[in-house]
Amino acid sequence: MKKIAISVLVPSLNRAKYIEKCLKSIHNQTLNNIEVICIDAGSTDGTIDVIDEYVKKDSRFIRVDSPRKSYGFQLNTAIDIAQGEYVTIVESDDYILPDACEFLYKNASENKLDFFRSGVNQFLIINNQEIVYKQIFFLPSKDINKVYSGQISLENRLKAVVSILGTAYRKEFLKGKDIRANESSGASFQDVGFCIQVNSMANRFMYSNKPVYNKKMDNEDSSIYAVKNNNVLISEYEFLDTKVDAGKANREIVYHQQIMDYYWRLQVSEKQVRQQFLSEIHDRIIAISCYEYKVPLTEVERFQIEILLGNLKKFEDCEKGTENNALYYNKLFYGKEPIVVVSMGKLGKKLIALQKYYGRRSICAVCDNDKNLQGDIIDDYVVLSVEKAVNEHKDAVFIVANKLYSNEIQSQLISLGIEISRILLVTSLPAIGDIVKNMKTITNGLQGK
């Protein structure tokens, strides 16, 4: 009997709407010697019926019933019974490209890696059409496709914590290092602890920027946005205290990631629970700032720690002034003022995709200083020169979607007669999950007026 190259683990709970596409993408893999472990936590919406159809028609599929509604418990159970040399995780509302398993396994096995990570596409469904909102690449191009043997910068190691998905994990590595997911209830943040353990303990690993995993980003009922899950994130790091070595390198990864996660959590929390959240994490933030190894912090991290130690006024002042937060974009696209997007690079095109998500046409024109782009058609918009856009749309809000030359473009717009108060500089876009979280508030508060 041919050995199983890779075990595909599919945890599920009430995902009947999406799981057919997920399982079909796994069924159609170019790599044949796989097994598919569908571990369901008691679905009642027809999810199990879809799984059983695949179990009947494809002997590589098995269904396992989880007695607990815990993403971590489901993962641990599936890993324990997996027969593959490597395991990979596909969440039941996502799907993978046809060559995903072959690509992951080939790179992982040929290089004898503890883990191999690919890129990830984040997608939305807009008017029944799939739109790639963002591609996640975990390392810069210069750092991909090379084997790391435990030697990689802290900055690059931290990037690997971002996602549990699009990755092949060597089963014997997980078993030998006793890497486990936290078996807390529900399906929030268990990937954080799992990824940090993997990232801290792996000796041979490699990254690719080729995306083979498609991640659905517009689930309104995503559990990570529930207020109650502030405590779940805290408990995830308490769990990590028992799993990660006390050595400097591992502890640094945990501390740096905690700052990022807690600050993000503060951003997506409702105003009325922010103070309580900061009180609950206070001792952990003090521990980070006083850590005996003197964790080297960036300016951004020092700023975030100051806020996490209780400076809510400073945080709220920053939130008011940023053009990169989700609430701001919700208000902007549901507002009555027309929008001109300046610069048609990646950021500019993402703004057009973002507009589609709102089901509106707030953008009245797009423009660029590059004469080679002027006259091109991008999603039904003719790219204008900046001068022509200003002449035709003087009353619009001008969004400058350019990281490198935003200040120069701002000066250009001012010289053409646009007031600085009507110019927004954009250097990044919000996570789509944050947009979904605020959507109902905005539609109820603004659209009805």
Image (cartoon, rainbow, N blue to C red):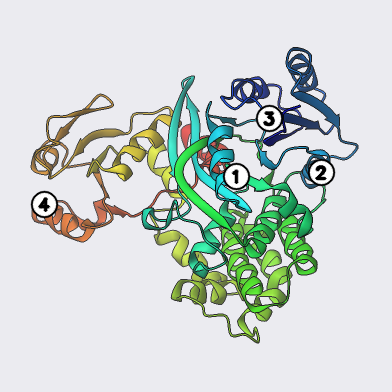
At which x and y percent is residue 70?
Answer: 81, 43
Residue at the front extreme of this rendering: 1
Gap in Å between the C-alphas at discs 3 and 1? Answer: 14 Å
Pinpoint residue 300: horizontal percent, then vertical percent: 46, 71
Q: Is residue 397 left or right of residue 433?
A: left
Mark 2 or 1, which is nearer the eye? 1
Q: For the point 78% across and 63% down, which residue is it? A: 239
Task: Locate residue 345: give its quadrant.
Answer: top left
Instruction: Give the answer, above or below, for where 42 lies relative to 323.
Output: above
For marks 4 and 1 on the same chain, the one whose residue lies earlier in the sequence: 1
Task: Give the x, y percent position of residue 36.
Answer: 72, 29
Mark 2 or 4, closer to the camera: 2
Q: Which element is circle 4 on? A: loop
Query: In the figure, residue 85 lies in which quadrant?
Result: top right
- Residue designated by label 3: 34
Dot 1, crowdedness within 10 Å: few (<14), some or many (≥20)?
some
Question: What kind of residue is marked 3?
Answer: Ile
Which residue is denoted by mark 1 in the rendering?
Answer: 109
Structural crowding at the residue carrying mark 2, measured as other residues with C-alpha within 10 Å and reported as few (<14), some (14–19) or many (≥20): many
Give residue 70's mark.
Answer: 2
Q: Nearer the viewer, residue 153 or 298?
A: 153
What residue did someone put label 4 on? 417
Q: Is residue 273 visible?
A: yes
The nearer-to-camera label among 3 and 2 is 3
- Evaluate if marks 4 and 1 touch, with contact meaning CB atoms under 8 Å apart: no
Q: Nearer the viewer, residue 48 or 388?
A: 48
Describe the element under mark 1 as helix, strand or loop: helix
Which of the two labelled residues, at mark 2 and mark 4, occupies the earlier sequence position? 2
Marks 4/3: CA distance? Answer: 62 Å
Helix, strand or loop under label 2: loop
Q: Are marks 2 and 1 in contact (CB under 8 Å)?
A: no
